[in-house]
Amino acid sequence: MSLEYVLYPGCVASVREIGYELSVRKVFERLGVKLSQSNDFNCCMPACLVHSVDYVRGLALTSRNLAVAEEMGLPMLTLCSSCFGNLSRAKYMLDEDPQLRREVNNVLASAGRKYRGEARVEHVLTILHKDYTVDKLKEQVSNPLGDIVAAPFHGCHIFMPAKYSGFDDPEFPSKLDTLMAATGVQVVDYSEKTSCCIGCGSFFGDVSQTASLKLVDKILASAKEAGADCIVTTCPFCIMQLEIGQIKLRDEGKDYGLPVLHFVDLLGLSMGMDPGELGFELRRVSVKPLLAKVRG
Amino acid sequence: MGPAKRLLDKLLDEEKLGYCQNCGMCTASCPMARVIPDTYNPRLLLQRAHLDLEGLAEGEELWLCSWCYRCTERCPQSIQPTEIFLLTRNFASERGNIPRNPRMIIRNIIRMGRSMPVDEFTNELREDYGLPPVEGVSEKALDEQRKIMGEEFMRRVEE
């Protein structure tokens, strides 16, 4: 099995969540998945920002990245669920609406680009689940994490709306849970499992940042109450909101002490990789209590 | 506004905003409305997009949608509030109403092709962990980006 992708790192992972990017590179190397690079990509041009200024030019800017990947002839590996959702959305809209595709391609022509409809947009989880497959992943697990109780946090853009990404059931997503179970952890159910961290909304200033903190508080409390040792996400933006939120909530006298990991961190641990190699000391909420359970 | 207007008309008419049942599924599903219900209510915003687009474009509520798509996923009439709000923000942007924070992030994108600037510390830290430096977006990519954005887009954000 030879898998190759072009890495689309995105802004959040490469600047704010380099521990996550590190884990992806190390784990994929170990799995024999090849990653190419390009500096011809630019920002995914999130619809909530760039398309809000001009919907069609915004779509063209996002689709430019699809066109770059098409020229390289490789599927894209996105690290961020919002990059994944935004690129999947553009692809869906252009594939479904021929008139819109013509309009977008007219704009792209001014930069010598064309979207041909061949780009494939993938995410760390979609690749592990669909391309690598869960059965093969299980064969890689040398250090099952049976003592850890982990709370899955799905986020939004990796599975909603279902018509854009097509990855999971929009009401009862389960693929993250399946992947987590492959590492041996005890996957715990909790009421905020499919909640939103309001990461994408928190751009807009004080009102939305306060809203995000209120919801993060509910998510952490719910996971804690369910007995979780950690939260496991699909998205670097969720990691940021859930970690930074915990630090802010400490000032309000609420100390959850819940480590937040990306699924790929958990996978690396279960493959017997060293926490240092996976950049665990970069985590804003200490992972030490969790690691004690791994070694024990 | 050309193609965007065509899309908004399509969403507002063909996709049956007139058939909104007022069931409130959008508001009940909205994470923002859950924690700041007195400030944000997508069901009411949808009605205003239909009845008072100009007035809606002047306010800030329109920009509070967190783009999570729960309302779009669940609407029993297949109305797409998330996309309607994005298109409605085009009207606001045309009129110069882009709130400060989003405006600053989009300016980063215009200048660097990235939403978040890369400082020296970032690349030092990356080096410590054996990661390649984040190189700037290539000149070629930035040039293409400017051509696709066009003058009017940049004027809306920079003014």
Image (tube, coloured by chain):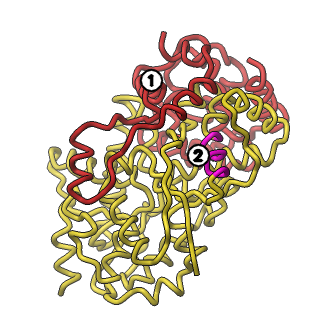
Chain colours: A yellow, B red
Using the image as rendered, state which of residue B134 and residue A133 is in the foreground.
B134
Q: Can residue B106 be seen in this view?
A: yes
Residue A3 is left or right of residue A209, and the answer is right
Residue A238 is left or right of residue A100, and the answer is left
Q: Which residue is drawn at 48% across and 44% down?
A: A39
Give the number of the disc on residue B155. none
Q: Badge 2 is on which residue?
A: A86
| Amino acid type of the residue that numbered disc 1 sits on in the rendered structure | Arg
Does residue A246 sit above or below A115 in this rendering?
below
Using the image as rendered, state which of residue B95 and residue A92 is in the foreground.
A92
Q: Mark 2 lies on which chain?
A: A
Q: Badge 1 is on which residue?
A: B107
* Dot 2 alpha-carbon crowd within 10 angstroms: few under 14, some 14 to 19, many 20 or more: many
Asked whether residue A65 is drawn in magenta, I would say yes
- Give x and y (percent) for residue B42: 58, 35
Asked whether residue B122 is drawn in magenta, I would say no
- Give x and y (percent) for residue A46: 54, 38
Q: Can residue B71 be seen in this view?
A: no
First to last magenta residue range: A63-71
Please tell me whether mark 2 or mark 1 is closer to you in this view.
1
Q: Residue at x 69, y 48 (%)?
A: A91
Q: Which residue is drawn at 29% across and 73% down?
A: A227
Residue A122 in which image quadrant: bottom right
Residue A72 in which image quadrant: bottom right
* Dot 1 alpha-carbon crowd within 10 angstroms: few under 14, some 14 to 19, many 20 or more: some
Using the image as rendered, state which of residue B37 and residue A112 is in the foreground.
A112
